[in-house]
Image (tube, rainbow, N blue to C red):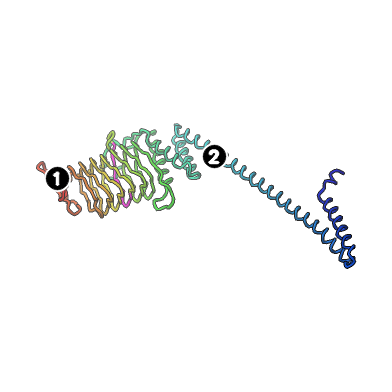
């Protein structure tokens, strides 16, 4: 009974009826008003109360529906956060397990761990730099193989085989190299970041990062055997190959870096190039240094552009050198920069070869 008395609907009808009787009765006291008009006017007044109640009821239903939708939205957001947390937890567990398996004795397990890390990086971009750091760290581990002890092979003879463990580890390392190239964005991709690579002291063979966008590259005191291909790369950060090919008789084989672009400093100081070197059409937007570097065979810089300075102090060109730059550097340092006197070299305008009394030859600039 109490619940019925508290019902808004009941009181709405009561007030409507009272208003109908009150308005109708008041109008009936006027002789000029007919009974039908009085009842009609009273009905309108009572109906207005019912209409107001209907409007209030609709507004209440609307607010209830809005609250229900808000609660549903919050519930969905909570489920999404829980799903993200579960995904993060699973990813973290996969990551930790894969890193742990990199130390496994079986080479196939280590290869599987590398692919698991690469798959994680492809699925979640937040892991990409971390996975690249781990792959680079794996390649920085000390590694020796008999095929690296000989400076060069005769003809097309196959490389010297190592022990079973060495050959298996070589396959794992080449997998890591290939995955690094696959994880890096394409050089012509827009809106993609440049990821950093730290390969200081790494031993690499057939290293190929061609047509890739890279942030900062550290390859100090590394060994680049057989061939290295950095053609078409875009380096957004500084590049350091300082002393590559010098530590522990490491070598640098055929080095290709055609049509690449160095946005910042490119430091090749003290590098020992044991095979041909190619920088055709490469753009050096920042400082470039080949100080104390040795070019044992042909060095081709045809069409290269140097936007800032070029340091060639004490560099040695022991083979043919093509220095026909498309855009010569604004400032060049030539101090004891020697070339092979028995070869004809392609030089920029104003550069000459000066023969020294001891039979050597060095590069000079007329204005210097």
Q: At 87% across and 64% down in the image, what residue appears?
A: 38
The local secondary structure at tag 2 comes to helix
Q: Is residue 256 magenta?
A: yes
Query: 151 or 137, which lies in front?
Result: 137
Q: Which residues are magenta?
A: 250-261
Q: Is residue 287 left or right of residue 174?
A: left
Q: Position of residue 189 (x, y in %)?
A: 42, 52
The relative height of residue 17 versus residue 252 in the rendered view (above or below) is below
Q: At 48% across and 40% down in the image, what residue appears?
A: 116
Count of labels in the image: 2
Report the mark closest to the observer, 1 or 2.
2
The local secondary structure at tag 1 comes to strand
In this figure, which residue is indicated by the disc labeled 1? Answer: 361
Res. 168 visible in picture: no
In this figure, which residue is indicated by the disc labeled 2? Answer: 88
Q: Position of residue 335 (x, y in %)?
A: 18, 43
Query: 332 or 107, which lies in front?
Result: 332
Q: Position of residue 153 (x, y in %)?
A: 27, 41
Circle 1 crowding by C-alpha within 10 Å: few under 14, some 14–19, many from 20: many
Query: 283 or 19, which lies in front?
Result: 19
Give the CA distance from mark 1 to mark 2: 63 Å
Quarter of the rendering containing residue 151: top left
Labels 1 and 2: the sequence-earlier one = 2
Q: Is residue 308 magenta?
A: no
Q: Position of residue 106 (x, y in %)?
A: 45, 33
Q: Is residue 271 left or right of residue 117?
A: left
Res. 200 visible in picture: yes
Q: Quadrant of the N terminus?
A: top right
């Amino acid at each position: 009974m109490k619940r019925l008395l508290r019902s808004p609907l009941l009181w709405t009808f009561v007030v409507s009826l009272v208003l109908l009787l009150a308005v109708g009765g008041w109008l009936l006291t006027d002789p000029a008003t007919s009974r039908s008009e009085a009842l009609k006017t009273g009905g309108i007044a009572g109906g207005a109360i019912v209409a107001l109640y209907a409007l209030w009821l609709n507004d209440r239903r609307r607010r209830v529906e809005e609250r229900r939708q808000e609660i549903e939205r919050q519930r969905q957001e909570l489920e999404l956060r829980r799903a993200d947390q579960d995904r993060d937890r699973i990813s973290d567990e996969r990551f930790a397990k894969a890193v742990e398996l990199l130390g496994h004795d079986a080479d196939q397990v280590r290869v599987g761990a590398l692919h698991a890390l690469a798959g994680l990086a492809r699925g979640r971009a937040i892991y990409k730099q971390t996975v690249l750091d781990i792959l680079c760290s794996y390649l920085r581990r000390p590694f020796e193989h008999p095929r690296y002890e000989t400076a060069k092979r005769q003809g097309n003879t196959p490389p010297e085989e190592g022990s079973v463990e060495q050959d298996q580890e070589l396959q794992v390392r080449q997998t890591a190299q290939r995955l690094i190239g696959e994880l890096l964005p394409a050089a012509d991709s827009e809106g993609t970041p440049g990821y950093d690579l730290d390969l200081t002291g790494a031993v690499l063979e057939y290293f190929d990062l061609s047509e890739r966008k890279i942030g900062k590259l550290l390859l100090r005191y590394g060994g680049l055997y057989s061939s290295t291909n950095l053609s078409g790369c875009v380096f957004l950060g500084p590049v350091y190959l300082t002393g590559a090919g010098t530590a522990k008789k490491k070598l640098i084989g055929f080095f290709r870096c055609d049509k690449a672009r160095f946005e910042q400093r490119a430091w090749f100081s003290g590098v020992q190039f044991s095979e041909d070197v190619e920088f055709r059409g490469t753009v050096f937007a920042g400082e470039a240094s080949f100080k104390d570097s040795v070019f044992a065979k042909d060095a081709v810089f045809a069409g290269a552009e140097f936007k800032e300075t070029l340091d060639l102090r004490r560099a040695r060109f022991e083979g043919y050198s093509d220095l026909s730059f498309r855009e010569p550097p604004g400032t060049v340092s030539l101090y004891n920069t020697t070339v092979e006197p028995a070869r004809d070299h392609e030089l920029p305008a104003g550069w000459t070869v000066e023969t020294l009394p001891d039979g050597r030859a060095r590069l000079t600039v007329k204005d210097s």
